Amino acid sequence: MKMNIAIFKAINGLVHECTLLDKIMILFSKYVPLVFIIGLAVLYLCGVHRKDKRLRCIAISTFVITVINLFISYMIGIFYYEPRPFVNYKVNLLLPHAVDASFPSDHAIGTMSIALGITNHYRIYGRILILISFLVGVSRIYVGHHFPMDVLGSYFIVLISNYVYMYVLQDKINEGYLKIEEFLIKYVTLTK
């Protein structure tokens, strides 16, 4: 616990040292997770536009594992309350935040879920997204919202659930999605 607090203070202690770095960290913390979601939607729409089942399945599968991971995060937050750093410590808080559970970090879980979902199919793009997700995690510490272990624990949750999902659910989700899509296309065609 002492190391967790020490690392937090080292990262969060950089706030107000460089205005540009503060703005970059706010950008990563606040807006980059939204860019991940938009990117996933664009991937799906590219699959629709190109009539590429594979792209659509990658987007749907990645969306499903992200929702599963965010649900896991929500459930952990209900049953285990770890106070945010600003609740018990004097911190440099760059952005206001609700006083809810600090563990796990939804931002880290969401961005890493999407990054790993893409990595399963496109290694180069996925690795870039993994790096950006790590920057999002650091930014959450920097702005004063999470301890380092909140972020690392989030990544650990995603790693385990992604592994289980890939080997247990992914093919079933893809098959189910394609059946629903086929049904909807037939239904739309019949009603025209």
Image: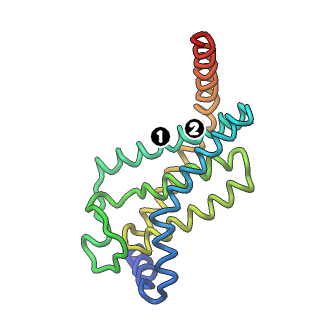
Q: Where's the C terminus, which quadrant?
A: top right
Residue 166: image x %, image y %?
62, 38
Residue located beneath label 2 in the image:
165
Residue in view at x 46 percent, y 66 percent: 29
Report the colour scheme.
rainbow
Q: Is residue 114 left or right of residue 145?
A: right
Q: Residue furthest bottom?
A: 17
Distance of label 2 from label 1 (alpha carbons): 9 Å
Q: Looking at numbered disc 2 in the image, what kind of residue is underneath it?
A: Tyr
Q: Residues within 10 Å of mark 1 (few under 14, many from 20)?
A: some
Q: Is residue 176 left or right of residue 13?
A: right
Q: Residue furthest top?
A: 190
The mark found on residue 102 in the picture is: none
Q: Nearer the viewer, mark 2 or mark 1?
A: 1
Foreground of the two, 6 or 111: 111
Above or below 118: residue 53: above
Q: Where's the N terminus, which quadrant?
A: bottom left
User: Would you say the residues marked 2 and 1 are in contact, meaning their CB atoms lie under 8 Å apart?
Assistant: yes
> For numbered disc 1, what is the local secondary structure?
helix
Q: Residues within 10 Å of mark 2 (few under 14, many from 20)?
A: some
Choose the circle earlier in sequence order: 2 or 1: 1
Residue 52: image x %, image y %?
74, 33
Residue in view at x 59 percent, y 42 percent: 62
Residue 63: image x %, image y %?
55, 41
Foreground of the two, 34 or 120: 34
Q: Looking at numbered disc 1 in the image, what kind of residue is underneath it?
A: Ile
Q: Is residue 25 left or right of residue 143?
A: right
The mark found on residue 68 in the picture is: 1
Above or below 49: residue 3: below
Residue in view at x 44 percent, y 75 percent: 142
Where, by quadrant of the figure, is residue 140 drawn? bottom left
